[in-house]
């Protein structure tokens, strides 16, 4: 076995407007099955063979997916496109791609077949046509197991507006917009997130945000930590669990569940029409 050192995908940063039109350019039309299978198989063979420099990745994955896989890789500690930390010839020999529905396909391979710790990995993948070329535009993260379907991806054409009638409405609508940006996977996501943070966080909260990000990088070597979600990524299927619970003195608890229970304390400041987030504090969830 060999350890994977893919130069995977730590976020290309492109400036775009936060409230502008969505940036997903994928064509909704069905990709011919033979072309899709050939593209996916070639991509995965190169990944398993550890022969996929960044310029080659860009020939197979949309920019939004490349960035997404970078966030998932940091979150899980395994290379996201493979859900593995090392590779072997057995993975290449057993590699299979089969159609599911529409532009969705299942990639599978078996590592260490016949051995006690052998396992088969199944990874749903979606393809699209971009500029007339077949591209991978979604790979289901490890935490969703074998789920597939377009509901896994958010709609970047409909980022909700941030509302200011009350502190609670402000916090709720801010998180609706912020998490939809993550869920819709636009290219240049980090710059879009930075724009909304600069618009709705006080200078003090921005400094706290950057301090927690830098501290996480120094302690764990993990870039991209986001204190507003207490993690590195936010999936569309998690958005329905999002709750904003009022506390005392303009304090709120933001809660959502994914593979763990996440709780973030948020303090607001300001007046109707001009609210801002003044403090961010991820907290450890304790069972009641």
Image (spheres, rainbow, N blue to C red):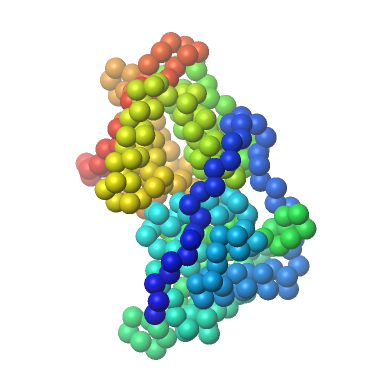
- Where is the C terminus found, in terms of image quarters? top left
Q: Residue at x 52, y 30 (%)?
A: 195
Q: Is residue 157 above or below residue 145?
A: above
Q: Residue at x 42, y 86 (%)?
A: 113
Q: How many marks?
A: 0
- Where is the N terminus found, in terms of image quarters? bottom left
Q: Is residue 264 visible to the viewer in this orientation of the structure?
A: no
Q: Is residue 199 above or below residue 112?
A: above
Q: Is residue 11 visible to the viewer in this orientation of the structure?
A: yes
In the image: residue 50, left or right of residue 154: left
Q: Is residue 226 above or below residue 112?
A: above
Q: Residue at x 33, y 51 (%)?
A: 221
**Image location of residue 169, percent across then percent down:** 46, 22
Q: Looking at the image, which is closer to me, 8 or 102?
A: 8
**Image location of residue 98, percent across then percent down:** 62, 74
Q: Is residue 53 above or below residue 267?
A: below
Residue placed furthest toward the top = 271
Residue placed furthest toward the bottom = 114
Q: Residue at x 29, y 51 (%)?
A: 220
Using the rendered view, name the quadrant where residue 88 is placed: bottom left
**Image location of residue 9, percent across then percent down:** 51, 55
**Image location of residue 45, percent across then percent down:** 57, 75
Q: Looking at the image, which is closer to me, 10 or 272?
A: 10
């Amino acid at each position: 076995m060999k350890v994977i050192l893919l130069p995977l995908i730590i976020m290309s940063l492109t400036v775009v407007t936060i409230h502008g039109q969505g940036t997903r350019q994928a064509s909704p039309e069905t990709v011919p099955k033979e072309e899709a299978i050939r593209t996916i198989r070639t991509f995965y063979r190169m990944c398993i063979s550890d022969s996929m420099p960044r310029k080659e990745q860009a020939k197979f994955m949309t920019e939004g997916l490349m960035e997404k896989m970078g966030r998932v890789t940091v979150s899980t500690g395994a290379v996201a496109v493979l859900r593995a930390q090392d590779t072997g010839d057995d993975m290449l020999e057993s590699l299979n791609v089969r159609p599911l529905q529409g532009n969705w396909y299942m990639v599978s391979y078996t590592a260490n077949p016949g051995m006690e710790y052998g396992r088969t990995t199944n990874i749903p993948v979606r393809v699209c046509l971009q500029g007339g070329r077949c591209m991978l535009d979604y790979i289901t993260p490890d935490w969703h197991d074998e789920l597939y379907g377009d509901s896994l991806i958010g709609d970047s054409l409909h980022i909700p507006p941030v509302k200011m009638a009350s502190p609670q409405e402000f916090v709720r609508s801010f998180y609706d917009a912020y998490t939809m940006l993550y869920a819709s996977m636009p290219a240049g996501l980090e710059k879009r997130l930075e724009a909304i943070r600069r618009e709705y966080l006080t200078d003090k909260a921005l400094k706290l945000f950057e301090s927690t990000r830098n501290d996480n990088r120094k302690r764990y070597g993990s870039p991209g930590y986001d204190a507003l979600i207490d993690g590195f990524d936010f999936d569309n299927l998690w958005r329905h669990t999002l709750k904003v619970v009022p506390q005392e003195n303009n304090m709120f608890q933001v809660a959502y569940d994914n593979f763990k229970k996440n709780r973030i304390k948020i303090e607001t400041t300001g007046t109707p029409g001009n609210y801002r987030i003044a403090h961010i504090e991820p907290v450890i969830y304790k069972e009641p």
